[in-house]
Image (tube, rainbow, N blue to C red):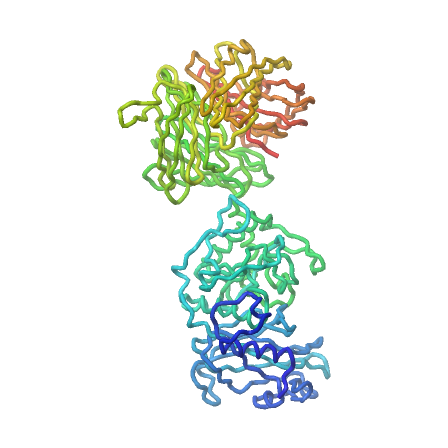
Amino acid sequence: MKLPAPLAALLLLAALLAAGLPAGGAAQARQQGPAARVAAWELSAVDDWRAGASGGLLVTNNAGGELRLADGATAGSFLSAPFKTSFPANAAGATWVAELLPGTDLTLELRGRATPPAEGDDAGWSPWLPLVAGDARSDQGALATADVVGLPAGSEYLQLRASFASSVERASAVLNEVAVSYIATAQATPVFPAGLPRRPLPFGPDTLTPRPAVIARQAWTGRTEAARPARATPRGVILHQIDATDTPSTTLELLRAELAYQTQVLGWDDLSYHFLIDGEGNLFEGRLGGPTSRVDRLAGGDTAVHVALLAPRDGAPSDQAQAVLVALLAWLGEAYAIPPTGEHSVPGATPARRPNISSHAEAVPGAPDPAAATRELLPALRQRADASTVRARWYFAEGNVADYSQRLSFYNPTGAEADARVTLIPRGASPVTRVIAVPARARADLTVNDLVAGADALPAIVESSAPILAERTMGLTTDIDGGPGISELSRVWYFAEGSTEGDSRTYLILFNPNPAPVSSTVTYMRRDGTQAEQEVQIPAQARTVVTVGDITLPDGTRPLANTGFGMRVVAAQPIAVERTMRFGPNQAGMHTGRGISTLSRRWLFAEGTTEGDFAMRLLVLNPNDQPANVSATFTGPEGEAESRRYAVPPRAQLAIDVNEVAPGQGVSSVVQSDRPVAVERALSFNNGAAGTVGAGATAPRYGWAFVEGRTSDATYYICVGNPGRSPAVVTVDFGFGDDGATGQQRFRVPPGARYTLAVHQLYPNEGSVTAIVRGTQPIVAERSIFPGGGARGGATTLGIPIE
């Protein structure tokens, strides 16, 4: 019997693979799957069709043999004789050649069993398993099932059923040939997904949304394979469903059979699914090369990430699978700019626009998957993925409700209400989590003392699916401080200011949110160029506080007692680091704030004053091995300037007394250096009993945001510096409380000058004030708040840069 060329090639390939022989250069160039036995059962000749039972059908010898409806029949069926396989199989797929005229229909089904069948007895057979092509084609162009169907373990008998129907007189679908490829992978190891190593997805850019843990392709196949994909940036995600009973003992067998079928039988370049998720919530790496590996075989080659769910044919994925899918969709959405609730255009497709997360049936009308129950879940899955996307994360290493009053404030810049998920981590106790609703374009607060009482160590993590902004305020009865959290962890942190002189105390707070301990090295750099080092271990998901002045060497000396210094922290993994200082009589003064993660050659400060009893210093830390030449320029309200030059020795701190350079005036400052340095500004007042310290801006921006603020029993200033050569028109939009009340101010800042806006005079007695500052030129904006007009201290902080 002479076989049609495509089918003959298919059978030859299957036979070679079953015999363990090489399949030729073309096959060797393709991605090869795990060790699997593959063979084919073929029906194409007149004798093949006549060997089965049929009704309402006609067998002809056209093209070697074909099956069609008999004259006048509108329906008919064919049932093959049972076929004895050459080895026990656990999965099967099929390719077929057929002519499907409009108004005609052809349905193919397969079933299997392990024991010899008794004539006329259906007991022992598996249920009929539909074989549906959708948009799948073999390498030779034949219709094909995209996926394998699972057979009963050790199946040695197969049976095919074909059903024909026509709604058009004298029209019939024509079936020319069918090749059922049966596969055995049961001998492969390991058998169970449990225990296989997982790793965070290694693809894509860094994201706030956690990377899901995946079982790598090598781990579940046991083979190392090179990826050589064509690349394309995905614009959407397409969900598929592979029929599976989905028990742990069959999952890996089915996956390995799927890989063998698509690559060795269909001739595809690789597995068509980037990721696969089973009923236990195991996430498997499918196609090699990650989400940008282009799939040309499905959905018309649309540049999408293909995700297959292993679930019963007519059922929805399990709760565990849904949870993993949601996490994957959230990460994909952030990593590849695929908003879960959005849509994108698909050139040449119908419809022309498609949801970013679509079912295979939505992408390809007539595709058999996923199941209706899964498609019904899609709207909820999209919403869950959107809510699971982390678009903002803020870390606060410092936290203490035993000695301070503490509040977290959140601003939501979007047009829809958002949730802020706050996780507080008390020492030696379980984390405390609260979800705070933040109204659209408004602010919400959380008084931490009301939630956790008496905790002297309380780092916090704030997360949201909206790009919210977060600040922390901490206060004594004699002083306050506040400012934004840390939006990005770092392995290296710098502090230009540090002191144990007189009444000053410096505390270094290192917070490790990672799941494993982290080691770090702290280098203290004094003004005379001498250094001291300290090794600090930070437990997992906890913080360590270093009381700098108490550091004691083995000989009993305290090298950092009664001295000024800067600090550098180098950690083995990214962490969050803040510094708290107490000073003045009875430690009445305090300030706390985040470190500097990036050095710069230029630092800008909008706020600064030497008026009254204010003392102002600029602290410059040069952590380099070479001297740094530094210039400091101080500019008054009208643009008048004073400049000084300094040489900072290697690995040393410089303190600039601004009161000596620009006495009795409000100033903005610019520090420039020929080497990257860290610069902070320190202000003290109330005879040294209150003060504030903070880093400047490394560059001006068009927009700055201030979440915290009040004018009730407080004076509130916004200072804007214009370091450019053109005047800047500045607009400040205010929000008050949570009732939607707003206000706006506009003013002009000349080139090289600064402007101070007294917010408390414009909007007195407001308990909650949020400010968004925007300029027509890049500017620098800072906020100063003085409770009781400064009688109870004050705080100055740089705004949060915004677009």
Query: Viewed as shown, does residue 296 lie left or right of 321?
Result: right
Query: Viewed as shown, does residue 541 lie left or right of 57?
Result: left
| Quarter of the image with the C terminus in it | top right
Q: Is residue 12 above or below residue 329?
A: below
Q: Is residue 167 above or below residue 260?
A: below
| Quarter of the image with the N terminus in it | bottom right
**Residue at figure coordinates x 61%, y 54% from the top left:** 236
x, y (%) of residue 626?
Answer: 49, 26
Judge by depth and name the residue closer to the eye, 598 or 342: 598
**Residue at figure coordinates x 44%, y 86% from the top left:** 116
Judge by depth and name the residue closer to the eye, 741 or 235: 235
Q: Is residue 453 visible?
A: no
x, y (%) of residue 521?
Answer: 39, 34
Q: Is residue 422 above or below residue 277?
A: above
x, y (%) of residue 652?
Answer: 45, 23
**Residue at figure coordinates x 63%, y 57% from the top left:** 303
Q: Is residue 309 above or below residue 735?
A: below
Q: Is residue 525 visible?
A: yes
Judge by depth and name the residue closer to the eye, 581 or 6: 6
x, y (%) of residue 250?
Answer: 43, 69
Query: Viewed as shown, does residue 359 lie left or right of 36?
Result: right
How many numbered discs? 0
Q: Residue furthest left?
A: 555
Judge by depth and name the residue closer to the eye, 442 or 605: 605
Displayed quadrant of residue 539: top left
